[in-house]
Image (cartoon, rainbow, N blue to C red):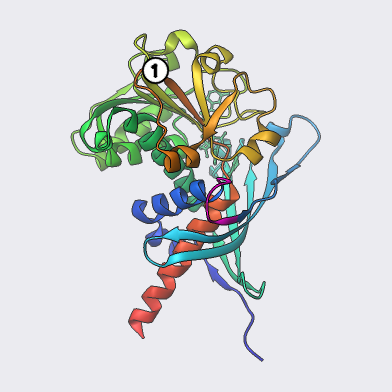
Amino acid sequence: MSDTTPAYYGADAVGPFLTWPLVNEAVESALKAVVKSSPALTAQPRRTFTPIGSQSVQDQGLLLTMPAFVGNYETSSRGGSSTLACKLVTSFSGNAQRQPPLPSILAHVLVFSHQTGQLAAIMEATDLTTRRTVAASLVSTKYLYFRRFGPDAEVTRPITVAIVGCGVQGQMHALAFCQSFRVRKLLCNNRSRAKAEELAKLIGLEVGGQAVEVCESSREACHEADVICVATFAKEPLIHSQDLKPSGGVHINAVGAGEIHFSEVAPSVYRRSKVYVDCYANAEAELVGLPAPITAEVGEVILSKDYPKEQDITVFQSMGMASEDACVAQAVLDAISAGKDKDE
Ligand SMILES: NC(=O)C1=CN([C@@H]2O[C@H](COP(=O)(O)OP(=O)(O)OC[C@H]3O[C@@H](n4cnc5c(N)ncnc54)[C@H](O)[C@@H]3O)[C@@H](O)[C@H]2O)C=CC1
Ligand SMILES: O=C(O)C1=NCCCC1
């Protein structure tokens, strides 16, 4: 009988493969694959939320189950690829206050053979989750912000970036945006100043010569920003219409969530904005009450090239979707087995 024990890949085994080219490509594939008109075959049922405790869901913790099949999606290395996976992820917003602190978001992805249904691998996916979420913001910023200024703007155009919320997501957004785009200034704000200062220090160490400012308020961080990334557990809005650059031409990656996904950004901002999502199906379930209509899925914009206008305010309402995790996990597995083949 063949060995059916799934391979286990811990964080140390997965980490070296989570490069920006790999993660960005896999996430862009997933964003396109969920679009109805795409040639890929995607099944991404609604994720489930299991609240732990009976008081405030957000304070107690959540377990999310996130299944997806993405069939026949495009990759540069393999042509058409398919993946079947389910991510199990917990969100405990109090973890950062523990001694020693733990990440608020912890995850594993189970990857199955899409031909036999056998469980092929279990992959630690905490860092994968962080990076694929940042990749969704990078890809969205490329197409929803930069492309409004022309085909090479993501390489040529300098931007000022605000990071509101300097936890795991905020830190990784800051690093990746400075490494991927021409960031002339990075403005950081966090509820506790110490975290914003920690991030400024990290950027100083990792990205030589980067101009960074720690701001007392989210307003101060946002007032001259072209691109804003907000990733907190705030239940009340942190970003208001009057905080934005008066000239318009602003893109917001709204990544975090309080009790609802859109709690960090004020209704006054949504009402002035074009709002884009990763996936309509999730939005139907998870963005009930969003104060503005949804303009399109990000994948639709990539495929149609129907970019926003220069002065538009755009919001990428990032919920996170299972297809992103499945495509990234599959790309990591492919890279691991390509490495093994080379060694043999
Ligand atoms: N859209 C997506 O795909 C994903 C979204 N997330 C969300 O991103 C957010 C941040 O996650 P992490 O960075 O991992 O968490 P974290 O705990 O590492 O960082 C959260 C940061 O937000 C700040 N914060 C918390 N509550 C706040 C409040 N009420 N007002 C202002 N600031 C507050 C904290 O000081 C902390 O620096 C969470 O809401 C999480 O659920 C996480 C993973 C994927
Ligand atoms: O997509 C994910 O993964 C998450 N989304 C919302 C918050 C927890 C993790």
Drawn side of residue 30 relative to residue 22, left or right: right
When the figure is inspected, residue 12 is found, relative to residue 249, above or below; the finding is below
Between 221 and 33, which is closer to the camera in this rendering? 33
Which quadrant of the figure contains the N terminus?
bottom right
Residue 125 seen in this snapshot: no
- Compared to residue 236, the image places residue 260 above or below, namely below
* Residue in the image at 56% along x and 63% along y: 83
Circle 1 residue: 222
Quarter of the image for residue 215 reads top left
Please tell me in which quarter of the rendered image ligand 2 is found: top right
Q: Per the image, is 202 magenta?
A: no
Residue 61 shows in this picture: yes
Residue drawn 37% across the image and 33% down it: 198
State the image coordinates of residue 259 (x, y, percent, origin top left): 67, 28
Q: How many residues crowd around disc 1 within 10 Å: few (fewer than 14), some, or many (20 or more)?
A: many
Q: Is residue 303 above or below residue 11?
A: above
In screen coordinates, is 140 left or right of 152? Answer: right
Magenta stretch: dominant secondary structure: loop
**Residue 121 placed where, x, y %?**
57, 69
Residue at 28% x, 26% y is 159
In percent of width and height, residue 29 lies at: 46, 52
Residue 235 x/y as whole percent: 62, 22
Judge left or right: residue 205 versus residue 4: left
Q: Image quadrant for the C terminus?
A: bottom left
User: Which residues make up the magenta segment?
Assistant: 35-41
Q: Give the quarter of the image for residue 164.
A: top left
Mark 1 element type: helix
Residue 156's place in the image compared with 1, above or below, is above
Q: Amino acid at mark 1?
A: Cys
